[in-house]
Image (cartoon, grey):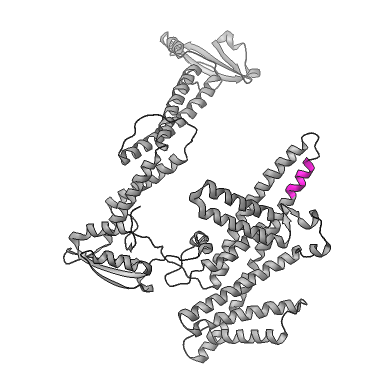
Amino acid sequence: MSKYSFILPTSGLDEFLESAQDLGLMDITRKSRAFNKDSRKMFDTAFSYRTAIKNLKAFDKNIEASEKGLPSDGEELLAMTEDLFGRLKKQENSLKAFNREMAEASLWGDFDSNDISRIKELGYSIKFYSVPENKYDSTWENEYAIQILNINGGRIYFAVLFPEGEELPFKLIEAKFPEKSVSEYESLVRETEKEISEIRSDIRHIADNVEILVGENEKLKERIEMYMAKDSVQKEGEGSISILEAFAPVSQDGDITSFLDSKEVIYLKEEAKEEDNPPVKLKNNAFARLYEPIGELYMLPKYGELDLTPYFAPFYMLFFGLCLGDIGYGIVLVIVGMIAKIKLPALKQYASLVQLLGLGSIIMPMLSGTFFGMKLAEILPMSDSVKGLFFSDIQMFWFAIIFGVFQIVFAKMLRGISQIIMKGIKYGLADIGWALLITSAAFGYAAMEGNDILPSSVMTGLAAGGAALILLFSVTEGNIFLRVIKGVTSFWDITSVFGDVLSYIRLFGLGTAGGILGMVVNSVAGQMSGLPYVGWLFAGLMLLVGHIAVLFLSGLGAFVHPMRLTFVEFYKNSGFEGGGRAFRPFRKK
């Protein structure tokens, strides 16, 4: 990154920033959050735009749109949208209440509210009761003026008339009587449903023209960016001089200097330093670029730090395949990614990532030969020598451990080499020592199990060399004797390394669990196929729904757990610090 410092008259600040926004190549330092009444209002409006756009895009597309005219002003259209959604929610709540009250009113049968009013005008009071049929005493009718209104669900609903001002010596607890009759509620329901339909039609009309709000939102974002940039400017000379800074990739230096030379501005260009806290813009090849969104879920590397994306990307793809653990599911992901590229071109990058993860899910499950919960060695005709190539469960367990050890050693070597390149040779030797020590320990354990891969002298040399490097270079400054003493304490980290290695067992566990679930689906479908006449239908549905469910569950675990291994084990052993801020060009949307 190049750092640019500008000095210009405050009177020309607006024109300069507008031109810089048109150029769109520099990340001009600007604030990012509301801090006063004006900016807070803009942020609130932007939030309202985002909410309205989200709601409109998710609105039911099957509703017929109205043909009413729309305001040309963006804020008026936003206000109309918010009003419609507010009215819609209010009417939908009213409809629920009316339906509930109508159901309660139906228990009393249909009645005319005017009749009740007329009875009260004649000088009578009314009380309403509800009792189970077996509790109703017909002798009450000899003592009181009782009118049965309805019999419903084993209960009798009745009213008792008595002269106004007198006490009714009735022992039952009075029931709640509806405010309106069933027919009145039905009328309210029809009116409310009609209004809801009209509101939905109006909303659908705005949703079909949501680009208007999207455009206004983008314009508002530009105004916010401009406002934040202006407020970030340092004023000197009683406000007559403005000072600001910006960052841009070195590759853009030519275009930027040509732009600045054409303006009445004094500027200084220099190489950005880490203490300047410059923004970070990742630069990766086509393969690694697909994995940048995964890395950004954690954080960006700080400026000057090694970007680990191209190094964790192949591991992540293969770890995903181990966790998914099924060739058939991998093929499905490749096909889904292919369809998504065609149908959703805006999501092409993510579709390509799905395809690569699907490819990893084809490659890694070939080790065990699992295909939609079945073992290829059991369903395909092949010789015993070919069947012997597939890994057993215990072999898959050890493969996951070995793969984890390999990634940890790779991370240590990567950290060591990067430290040597950036700081000097002594700063990376301890990490290389850890890589040698872990490697020798892994081969030593294999030898204990009867697998002599390396001569004992070579393993001893690796262990001794690694331990010496850790002892001498874990601390790089100070007296040599103090460094050695402190180096001894560094060996305590072996417990952390052991814990990291055990974390990779999850690769085996998730893959095995997915295979077992797929096998269960096949078993249940096989039992259903024995049903007469419709067995094939139920078996097919079970296979389809069951394997989709297993793919979803296994895919979720296969996405999350390799990410955990990346952000914890790999990043930690690679010495990743992170904390960088993204490069945000000051440009028009």
Give the residue drawn at x 68%, y 85%. Answer: 458
Q: Please give left or right for residue 425 compared with residue 554 in the image.
A: left
Which residue is more in the foreground, 72 or 324? 72
Give the residue drawn at x 51%, y 87%. Answer: 483
Q: Which residues are magenta?
A: 520-532
Can residue 175 be seen in the rendering of this structure? no
Total count of labels = 0
Q: Position of residue 416 (x, y in %)?
A: 53, 79
The image quarter containing residue 514 is: bottom right
The image quarter containing residue 278 is: bottom left
Q: Position of residue 122 (x, y in %)?
A: 42, 8
Q: Is residue 522 magenta?
A: yes
- The secondary structure making up most of the magenta span is helix
Give the residue drawn at x 67%, y 62%. Answer: 364
Q: Position of residue 190 (x, y in %)?
A: 47, 22
Q: Please give left or right for residue 147 compared with residue 11 in the image.
A: right
Q: Position of residue 314 (x, y in %)?
A: 58, 65
Relative vertical location of residue 103 with respect to residue 78 in this rendering, above or below: above
The image quarter containing residue 390 is: bottom right
Q: Is residue 454 magenta?
A: no
Give the residue drawn at x 51%, y 68%. Answer: 308
Can residue 520 be seen in the rendering of this structure? yes
Q: Quadrant of the N terminus?
A: bottom left
Relative vertical location of residue 52 with respect to residue 134 in this rendering, above or below: below
Which residue is more in the foreground, 70 or 505? 70
Relative vertical location of residue 570 with respect to residue 585 in this rendering, above or below: below
Which residue is more in the foreground, 109 or 229? 229
